[in-house]
Amino acid sequence: MQIAKHAVVSIHYTLKDGAGAVIDSSDGNEPLVYIHGIGNLVPGLETALEGKVTGAKLSVSVAPAEGYGPRDDKLVEKVPKRMFEGGVDVGMRFHSGPSVVTVTHIQGDMVTVDANHPLAGQDLHFTVEVIAVRAASEEELEHGHVHGAGGHHH
């Protein structure tokens, strides 16, 4: 079966940044299992996986527009330190409404937070191996995610 919309796909993957540093990998873990074509992966990776079959291996470079988007300087703001209960350190991440902000700088009583995705504006370099492809069940499609083994969220 080929990878197409609503296929349940199991992949092993490694994601590297432009400098070749590993950002994320399923190596040594269960494969990532996702439903294809409904926005579970960055668009550039989904596009590259379309039509592939079990056993396929590919290397994909995804530009920011097809990945986590360009960096937006408007998403960087300074907030008073008192807004953080229990202390704050550079590198800490907080949920702020629907987005996650990362603390990038602390100066005196002001904390700089960045709501850009940490990988925004970066080229993403994936190596992927397709482990399995199957049709999704109606229930899986209704819920938008895979049930059973390997169906955890990232």
Image (cartoon, grey):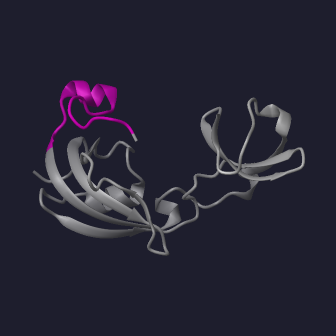
Q: Residue at x 38, y 44 (%)?
A: 40
Give the farthest residue toward the bottom. 19
Q: Residue at x 65, y 50 (%)?
A: 91
Q: Residue at x 71, y 46 (%)?
A: 89
Judge by depth and name the residue closer to the eye, 144 or 59: 59
Drawn side of residue 43 relative to residue 87, left or right: left
Q: Which image quadrant for residue 97?
A: top right
Q: Residue at x 35, y 42 (%)?
A: 38
Drawn side of residue 93 relative to residue 47, left or right: right
Residue 114 percent across, percent down from the top left: 70, 50
Q: Which image quadrant for residue 148?
A: top left
Residue 17 forms part of the magenta stretch? no
Residue 111 percent across, percent down from the top left: 81, 46
Disc count in the image? Answer: 0
Drawn side of residue 154 relative to residue 77, left or right: left
Residue 135 forms part of the magenta stretch? yes
Residue 147 percent across, percent down from the top left: 24, 29
Give the farthest residue toward the left. 1
Which quadrant is home to the C terminus? top left
Q: Which residues are magenta?
A: 134-153
Drawn side of residue 113 relative to residue 26, left or right: right
Judge by depth and name the residue closer to the eye, 108 or 71: 108
* 151 to 67, vertically: above or below: above
Residue 60 percent across, percent down from the top left: 34, 68
Chief secondary structure of the magenta portion: loop
* 145 to 35, vertically: above or below: above
Judge by depth and name the residue closer to the eye, 16 or 88: 88
